[in-house]
Image: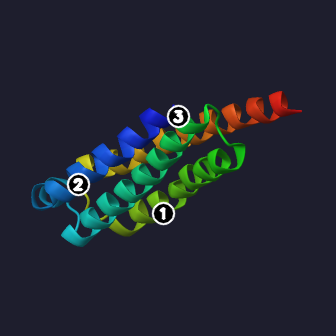
Amino acid sequence: MLLLDSGAGCTVGSVCLVLCPWLSGIYGFDPSLVLFIGAVNVIYGLSSGALLLLTTQRQDIPVAPLRFLALANASWVIPCGVLLTMTWSEATWLGVLHIILEATFVSWLALIELRIAGSLQFRER
């Protein structure tokens, strides 16, 4: 799960950063917004990847950092809603779709990570 989480964040973020001029055109977003989305995704992906490396060294998953990742994923839904509201009039359907899919994906990740954290905490007792 952490590999998917980290890989998705780094991949989407890198694509946004590298293809910013093109994506801003097809999304109807200001280039600075595409750069912001890309940077947040890369930073998050690297954080998730750090937890992945930690777990491979320890052979277990620390519950608190996993919960923090779940909270970060769930929290990203709020900025996604704000971005949709702010860009609704100029965004293309592809831009709207990107934000909706990103919010949906991170919500799903948060739910799965919370379930895993809950089962790990139950096992520790």
Tag 2 secondary structure: helix
Residue 88 seen from this side = no
Numbered tag placed on residue 16 in the rendering? 2
Using residue 59 as the reference point, say whether residue 56 is left or right of it. left
Q: CA distance from mark 1 to mark 3?
A: 32 Å
Q: Report the residue that reaches farthest toward the right.
A: 125
Q: Residue at (40%, 59%) from the top-left corner?
A: 43
What amino acid type is highlighted by mark number 1? Pro
Task: Name above or below for residue 98 compared with residue 24.
Answer: above
Residue that carries the numbered disc 3 in the rendered image: 56
Residue at screen point 23% across, 64% down: 29
Amino acid type at circle 3 is: Thr
Residue 98 rendering spot, x and y as whole percentages: 32, 47
Q: CA distance from mark 1 to mark 2?
A: 17 Å
The correct choice, above or below, for 59 with respect to 67 in the image is: above
- The x and y percentages for residue 30 are 21, 69
Q: Quadrant of residue 63?
A: top right
Coordinates of residue 72 in the picture (x, y in percent): 56, 55
Gap in angstroms between the C-alphas marked 3 and 2: 29 Å
Quadrant in which residue 25 is drawn: bottom left
Q: Earlier in the sequence, mark 1 or mark 2?
A: 2
Tell me if 84 is positioned left or right of 55 in this view.
left
Mark closer to the chain start, 1 or 3: 3
- 58 or 26: which is nearer to us? 58
Q: Amino acid at mark 2?
A: Cys
Tell me whether circle 1 and circle 2 mark residues in contact (CB < 8 Å). Answer: no
Q: Nearer the viewer, mark 1 or mark 3?
A: 3
Q: Which mark's residue is nearer the viewer, 3 or 2? A: 3
Q: Nearer the viewer, mark 1 or mark 2?
A: 2
Q: Residue at x 35, y 55 (%)?
A: 42
Residue linked to disc 1: 79
Q: Are marks 1 and 3 in contact (CB under 8 Å)?
A: no
